[in-house]
């Protein structure tokens, strides 16, 4: 998927500390059913083994590596992986299901025999690559250095399958592939991390301290970001990025915001913790690294704001980015919290109005929207 959010980052995020999240477990149940039906190539199997504590049958969808005429199972999540601990507790006696169940004996390899199998595994099972610190192209020495971290099991006593009704299996396989693609895309979109709009901090709010009339400067804790809708095969989600490189000030006189101007350093925006080249290219940050927002006319606040109540206001301003300035309407929510003034809001952005190149999506399967939202959370203190 060529979008703002990297697919490798999402896959790693579904297994923090080597343990599956709820989303990963739901996705694993789908794959386990598909592999068990035998509709995928031979290397994709469902491992069935009793749980080491409950004794109940546990199922794990896995990809096998083929080397020198033998099959191998590898733990892409390392020693802490549940299926590895269950297999050891069962002394290697398991069933592998691929159309039918086959009783197998898994023999764990010593560390010295693992490097070549690990390399072959990464070559043949692409989905495991995000969980390894090296690529499938790394040299033998690199695989020796990580071999102790990834258990490898030789699969014994796997009975060969007879090829009957081949055309039926081919047809069923094609149908299954379509279903899998739709299911995988849906899971990728719906179960992956989503970007929520910025909002006022949660928690208890303190009574206002000090006068409201003042020049208020942006301070630590402020954020600015963007969100763009991502759609694939009818499923949608939001991707986005954020930065803390926000500066500026507002001036309040009486119950009126008389002036305001803020700047955001777009070169520091990160998506899932990383700088994205596609984002920089779309916004032209090389030539126009800053986005600025300035108030076009004064905004009158509800008198209750001075006493600490949360209020909502509509402001008009000018948003400048990519070398282009356009009028915008900003809906913001604000409140006082002790010595702070806090404000959060969102600005709708049609990419074409600012000459922004629409980011690419995921080819024929889907796309990113041609508009998005610029969000902000401002934490301000008096000068």
Image (spheres, rainbow, N blue to C red):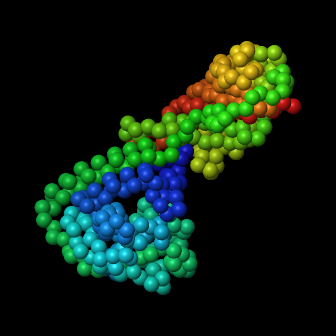
Q: Is residue 58 above or below residue 308?
A: below
Q: Residue at x 64, y 41 (%)?
A: 242
- Quarter occupied by residue 159: bottom left
Q: Measured from the top left, where is residue 347 in percent x and y?
A: 62, 27
The image quadrant where one finds the C terminus is top right
Q: Which residue is drawn at 55% across and 67% down?
A: 133
Q: Measured from the top left, where is residue 97 in percent x and y?
A: 25, 66
Q: Measured from the top left, where is residue 302 in percent x and y?
A: 70, 15
* Left or right position of 176 against 146: left
Q: Measured from the top left, where is residue 272 in percent x and y?
A: 58, 49
The reply to whether residue 45 is in sight is no
Q: Residue at x 67, y 35 (%)?
A: 204
- Quarter occupied by residue 371: top right
User: Which residue of the protein is positioned furthest toward the left in this rendering?
Assistant: 165
- Toward the viewer: 125 or 25? 25
The reply to whether residue 26 is in sight is yes
Q: Is residue 327 above or below residue 14?
A: above
* Left or right position of 321 against 209: left
Q: Is residue 51 above or below residue 147?
A: above
Q: Which residue is drawn at 39% across and 80% down?
A: 108
* Left or right position of 285 against 230: right
């Amino acid at each position: 998927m060529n979008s703002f959010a990297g697919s490798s980052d999402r896959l790693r995020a579904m297994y923090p500390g080597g343990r599956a999240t709820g989303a990963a477990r739901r996705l694993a149940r789908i794959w386990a059913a598909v592999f068990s039906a035998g509709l995928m190539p031979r290397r994709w199997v469902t491992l069935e083994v009793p749980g080491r504590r409950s004794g109940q049958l546990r199922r794990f969808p896995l990809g096998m590596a083929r080397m020198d005429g033998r099959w191998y199972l590898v733990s892409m999540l390392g020693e802490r992986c549940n299926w590895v601990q269950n297999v050891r507790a069962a002394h290697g006696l398991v069933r592998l299901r691929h159309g039918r169940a086959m009783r197998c004996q898994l023999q764990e390899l010593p560390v010295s025999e693992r490097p070549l199998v690990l390399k072959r595994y990464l070559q043949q099972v692409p989905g495991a690559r995000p969980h390894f610190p090296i690529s499938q192209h790394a040299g033998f020495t690199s695989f020796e250095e990580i071999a102790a971290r990834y258990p490898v099991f030789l699969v014994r006593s796997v009975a060969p399958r007879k090829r009957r009704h081949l055309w039926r299996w081919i047809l069923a396989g094609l149908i299954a592939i379509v279903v899998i693609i739709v299911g995988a895309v849906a899971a990728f979109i719906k179960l992956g991390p989503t970007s929520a709009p910025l909002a006022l901090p949660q928690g208890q709010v303190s009574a206002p301290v000090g006068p409201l009339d003042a020049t208020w400067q942006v301070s630590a804790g402020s954020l600015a970001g963007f969100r763009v809708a991502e759609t694939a095969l009818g499923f949608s989600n939001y991707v986005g990025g954020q930065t803390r490189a926000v500066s500026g000030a507002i001036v309040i006189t009486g119950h009126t915001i008389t002036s305001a101007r803020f700047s955001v350093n777009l070169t520091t925006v990160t998506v899932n913790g990383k700088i994205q080249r596609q984002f920089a290219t779309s916004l032209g940050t090389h030539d126009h690294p800053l986005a600025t927002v300035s108030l076009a006319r004064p905004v009158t606040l509800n008198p209750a704001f001075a006493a600490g109540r949360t209020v909502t206001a509509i402001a008009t301003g000018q948003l400048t980015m990519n070398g282009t300035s356009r009028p915008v309407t900003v809906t913001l929510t604000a409140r006082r919290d002790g010595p702070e003034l806090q404000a959060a809001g969102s600005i709708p952005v049609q990419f074409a109005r600012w000459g922004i190149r629409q980011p690419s999506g995921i080819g024929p399967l889907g796309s990113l929207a041609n508009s998005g939202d610029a969000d902000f959370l401002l934490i301000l203190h008096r000068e």
